[in-house]
Amino acid sequence: MNQDLFDRGLNTRREVLGADYVDAAIANADDFSRDLQQLVTQYAWGDIWNRPGLDRRSRSLINLAMLTALNRPHELRLHLRGALNNGVTKDEIREVLLQTAIYCGVPASMDSFRQAREVFKEMGV
């Protein structure tokens, strides 16, 4: 493990997803899942999320589209919160999800709209 990348990733992951969620994910890792938590924190959050080519808002918008396409509601909810933390607006999220209706299919987009409405309600957005 590259400790510097892991530490940078942990910081970025906390800033985007919230320290409570991230700290619980790390603390709840067991012998089976610990390597995955290290991998995700080091490579996804330490390396990719800190690359200079895109800002966090852009990365969040891309993630919302990809998670809709992959039909991953748990991760979508998490990244909806992250997108809001990164300054993405409710209107921008709506536009991304409308775009996914065309390119990913209406059922996937409808499910993502449902997830978004629940997250907005929970967060008071």
Image: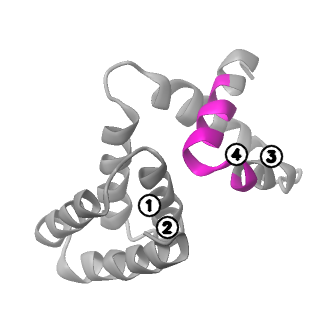
- Would you name the residue on which mark 3 appears? 34
- Would you name the residue on which mark 4 appears? 36
Crowding at dot 2, Cα within 10 Å, few <14 / some 14-19 / many 20+, comes out as: many
Secondary structure of the residue carrying numbered label 3: helix
Q: Return the mark for residue 80.
A: 1
Percent x, y of residue 84:
43, 54
Image label count: 4
Say what amino acid the circle numbered 1 marks. Answer: Leu
Q: Does the magenta stretch include residue 11?
A: yes
Q: In this view, does 5 lie to the left or right of 118?
A: right
Q: Give whichever of discs 1 and 4 has the lower sequence position.
A: 4
Say what amino acid the circle numbered 4 marks. Answer: Leu
Say what amino acid the circle numbered 2 marks. Answer: Arg
- Give the residues in magenta: 8-21
Q: Does the magenta stretch include residue 123?
A: no
Q: Return the mark for residue 77.
A: 2
Q: Give whichever of discs 2 and 3 has the lower sequence position.
A: 3
Is 98 above or below relative to 82? below
- Label 3 and label 4: CA atoms lie apart by 5 Å
Q: Are marks 2 and 1 in contact (CB under 8 Å)?
A: yes
Q: Give whichever of discs 1 and 3 has the lower sequence position.
A: 3
Q: Which quadrant: the C terminus?
A: bottom left
Crowding at dot 3, Cα within 10 Å, few <14 / some 14-19 / many 20+, comes out as: some
In this rendered view, identify the residue nearer to me: 6 or 121.
121
- Label 2 and label 1: CA atoms lie apart by 5 Å
Image depth: mark 1 or mark 3 in front: 1
In this rendered view, identify the residue nearer to me: 94 or 48.
94
Percent x, y of residue 72:
45, 68
Image depth: mark 2 or mark 3 in front: 2
- Label 1 and label 4: CA atoms lie apart by 22 Å
Quadrant for residue 39, please give it.
top right
